[in-house]
Image (cartoon, helix red, strand yellow):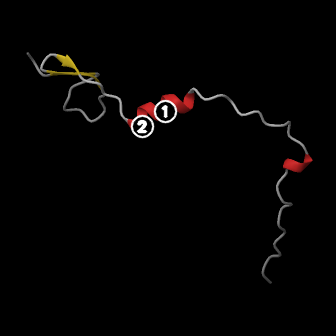
Protein backbone atom coordinates (compact mmCIF):
# COMPACT_ATOMS: atom_id res chain seq x y z
CA UNK A 1 0.00 0.00 0.00
CA UNK A 2 1.11 3.54 -0.71
CA UNK A 3 -0.02 7.13 -0.22
CA UNK A 4 0.64 9.06 -3.45
CA UNK A 5 -0.40 12.42 -4.89
CA UNK A 6 -0.20 13.29 -8.59
CA UNK A 7 0.31 17.00 -9.32
CA UNK A 8 0.84 19.16 -12.39
CA UNK A 9 4.13 20.55 -11.01
CA UNK A 10 6.34 20.20 -7.96
CA UNK A 11 4.20 19.77 -4.82
CA UNK A 12 6.18 22.62 -3.22
CA UNK A 13 5.09 25.12 -5.90
CA UNK A 14 2.02 27.25 -5.17
CA UNK A 15 0.84 27.21 -8.80
CA UNK A 16 0.42 23.44 -9.14
CA UNK A 17 -2.81 21.46 -9.09
CA UNK A 18 -3.50 18.07 -7.51
CA UNK A 19 -4.74 15.73 -10.24
CA UNK A 20 -5.18 12.52 -8.22
CA UNK A 21 -4.62 11.23 -4.73
CA UNK A 22 -4.22 7.64 -3.57
CA UNK A 23 -4.41 6.64 0.10
CA UNK A 24 -3.49 3.05 0.97
CA UNK A 25 -3.53 2.35 -2.77
CA UNK A 26 -7.13 3.49 -3.28
CA UNK A 27 -8.14 6.50 -5.39
CA UNK A 28 -9.59 9.36 -3.32
CA UNK A 29 -12.46 11.41 -4.73
CA UNK A 30 -11.19 15.01 -4.95
CA UNK A 31 -14.54 16.60 -5.75
CA UNK A 32 -16.19 18.94 -3.27
CA UNK A 33 -19.36 21.00 -3.06
CA UNK A 34 -17.92 23.72 -5.28
CA UNK A 35 -16.86 21.41 -8.11
CA UNK A 36 -20.18 19.53 -7.98
CA UNK A 37 -22.19 22.78 -8.01
CA UNK A 38 -20.07 24.13 -10.86
CA UNK A 39 -20.84 21.07 -12.99
CA UNK A 40 -24.52 21.19 -11.99
CA UNK A 41 -25.03 24.86 -12.86
CA UNK A 42 -23.00 24.72 -16.10
CA UNK A 43 -25.36 21.97 -17.30
CA UNK A 44 -28.55 23.94 -16.59
CA UNK A 45 -30.69 24.99 -19.58
CA UNK A 46 -30.38 28.51 -20.93
CA UNK A 47 -33.21 30.84 -19.82
CA UNK A 48 -35.78 31.73 -22.44
CA UNK A 49 -35.95 35.52 -22.36
CA UNK A 50 -38.13 37.69 -24.59
CA UNK A 51 -36.46 39.73 -27.28
CA UNK A 52 -35.17 43.06 -26.00
CA UNK A 53 -37.92 45.64 -26.19
CA UNK A 54 -38.63 49.12 -24.89
CA UNK A 55 -40.06 47.72 -21.66
CA UNK A 56 -36.66 46.22 -20.78
CA UNK A 57 -34.87 49.56 -20.79
CA UNK A 58 -33.69 51.00 -17.52
CA UNK A 59 -34.59 54.41 -16.15
CA UNK A 60 -33.50 57.48 -18.11
CA UNK A 61 -30.05 58.82 -17.26
CA UNK A 62 -29.88 61.36 -14.46
CA UNK A 63 -28.71 64.84 -15.38
CA UNK A 64 -26.55 66.42 -12.68
CA UNK A 65 -25.94 70.14 -12.76
CA UNK A 66 -22.34 71.11 -12.04
CA UNK A 67 -21.74 72.98 -8.79
CA UNK A 68 -21.31 76.71 -9.35
The kind of secondary structure element at disc 1 is helix
Question: Residue 46: image x %, image y %?
Answer: 68, 30
Residue 38: give its label.
1
Residue 43 image offset from top left, x and y in percent = 57, 26
Neighbour class for label 1 at 10 Å: few (<14), some, many (≥20)?
A: few
Could you say which disc has been placed on residue 34 in the image? Answer: 2
What residue is at 10 percent from the left and 18 percent from the top? 2
* Cβ atoms at labels 1 and 2 below 8 Å apart: yes
Q: In the rendered view, tell whether residue 22 sits above or below residue 34.
A: above
Left or right: 52, with 30 as reference point: right
Tell me the quadrant of the picture where the N terminus can be found.
top left
Q: In this view, does 5 lie to the left or right of 61?
A: left
Q: Give the vertical position of 17 relative to 53 (above or below).
A: above
Instruction: State the residue at coordinates (86%, 60%).
Output: 60
Res 14 → quadrant: top left
- Compare residues 14 and 41 and report the one nearer the observer: 41
Res. 64 image quadrant: bottom right
Residue positioned 19% across, 17% down in the render? 26
Left or right, residue 41 beside residue 13? right
Q: How far apart are marks 1 and 2 (CA)?
A: 6 Å
Residue displayed at 42% across by 37% down: 34
Quadrant location, the C terminus: bottom right
Answer with left or right where residue 25 lies relative to residue 30.
left
Element under disc 2: helix
Amino acid sequence: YADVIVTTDSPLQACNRVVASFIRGELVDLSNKHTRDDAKFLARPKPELPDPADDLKGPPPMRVKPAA
